Image (spheres, rainbow, N blue to C red):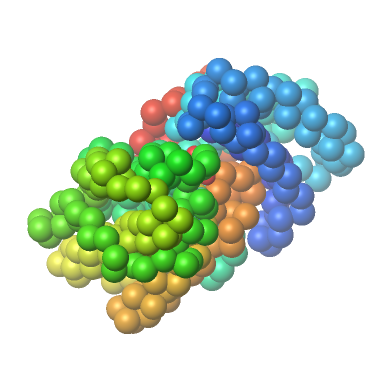
Amino acid sequence: MKVLAIESSCDDTSISIVNGDKNIEFLETINHRKFHKDHGGVIPEMAARQHLEILDLLGKSIKKINFSNISAIAATFGPGLIGGLIVGTSFAKGLSISKNIKLIPINHLQAHLLSPRLVSNIKFPYLCLLVSGGNTALVLVKSSNEFITLGSTIDDSAGECFDKVAKGLGLGYPGGPEIEKLALKGNNNKIKLPMPLTKKPNCDFSFSGLKTSALDFIRKNKKTKMFLKDFSASFQYTISKLFKIKILNSLAQLKKDKIIINDFSICGGVAANKYLNTELRKFIANQELNFHQVPLSLCTDNAAMIGWNAIEIMKARKIKLNNYNVRPTPNILIHEHF
Ligand code: KG4
């Protein structure tokens, strides 16, 4: 099994070839964040144009591919920004029709959740903390097509909170990596920030209150070098504490429901944060679970995980040749399928 995959849901244009033996034969991802940098976030129309240009460029690498070896073409059909989704899915549909190869529409969030399986021997069912720019959720991954959300954010995502707080600190976009860098030399305990929704024993997150009070605190203080470092360290520390509390609540919920899991992973852009990974690795080991790390290149948006998701689908069921009525769907939910 060999899949050619395309990802274009936000501000990364990516093409990959992945095979059923978990080999990533080709992966090229071009990020267009430099075009969005001055705006402090992704401008959807600009992103769509970038996807178009970059896919045209990456399309040249495709010319060298021997299509007789490709079993399917996969693309992200949602969720994401509609412009980018239209560009990527149209490209995939066109390629699929012209080469007479099956098309597999992929739910981007399910691809993130299955990405640990591309790089480790993680076993179903497992618990996964999905933390990307648009989502924060604790999900029980029961199989390649059964995803049960135990809790998710009721407002902002963790990634958005990182980005907005970084903007308040006067840092660049995306904010996560900038905060991580500054935090290395800061004091975790210097500033006490609120931990919303932690008094209730549920698995939902809320980051909007944390974001507002962080921005309020930043506004009231002089942004000295030391302040930036201490604030970043304290902010990251608060996020890690929030994650730990909600993971504990999820594990309690699973125990109550008599669901046994042995494995845990964290995926999505925020999972690229080394401090959070180290903290969660220790914490998960204390819960006597195996921690499966996704490499940095596969945490942020990439087409390899889209290709792998297609392989998981092909292993589980038969795929029709003509799948061309499926539409890009910007707001498809975690558990929904195309
Ligand atoms: O999954 P992802 O690449 O794409 C979207 O969901 O669009 O996630 C992007 C998010 C951004 O909010 C970014 O600030 C965050 O991931 N991120 C990080 C780090 N690297 C990326 N957050 C914290 N620490 C990082 N090192």
Q: Quadrant of residue 24?
A: bottom right
Q: Where in the figure is residue 289, as x and y percent of width and height? A: 37, 77
What residue is shown at x 16% (from left), y 57% (from top)? Answer: 198
Q: Where in the figure is residue 1, as x and y percent of width and height? A: 70, 51
Q: Is residue 243 visible?
A: no
Question: In the rendered image of this protein, does residue 15 appear above or below residue 176?
Answer: above
Residue in front for this viewpoint, 302 or 263: 302
Question: In the rendered image of this protein, does residue 337 appear above or below residue 201?
Answer: above
Q: Where in the figure is residue 297, as x and y percent of width and height? A: 62, 55
Residue in front for this viewpoint, 9 or 161: 161
In the rendered structure, the answer to whether residue 134 lies left or right of residue 211 reads right
In the rendered structure, the answer to whether residue 65 lies left or right of residue 124 reads right
Residue in front for this viewpoint, 80 or 167: 167
In the rendered structure, the answer to whether residue 143 lies left or right of residue 42 reads left
What residue is shown at x 67% (from left), y 57% (from top)? Answer: 20
Q: Quadrant of residue 68?
A: top right
Q: Is residue 50 visible?
A: yes
Q: Where in the figure is residue 209, as x and y percent of width and height? A: 21, 43
What residue is shown at x 85% (from left), y 32% (from top)? Answer: 60
Q: Quadrant of residue 57?
A: top right
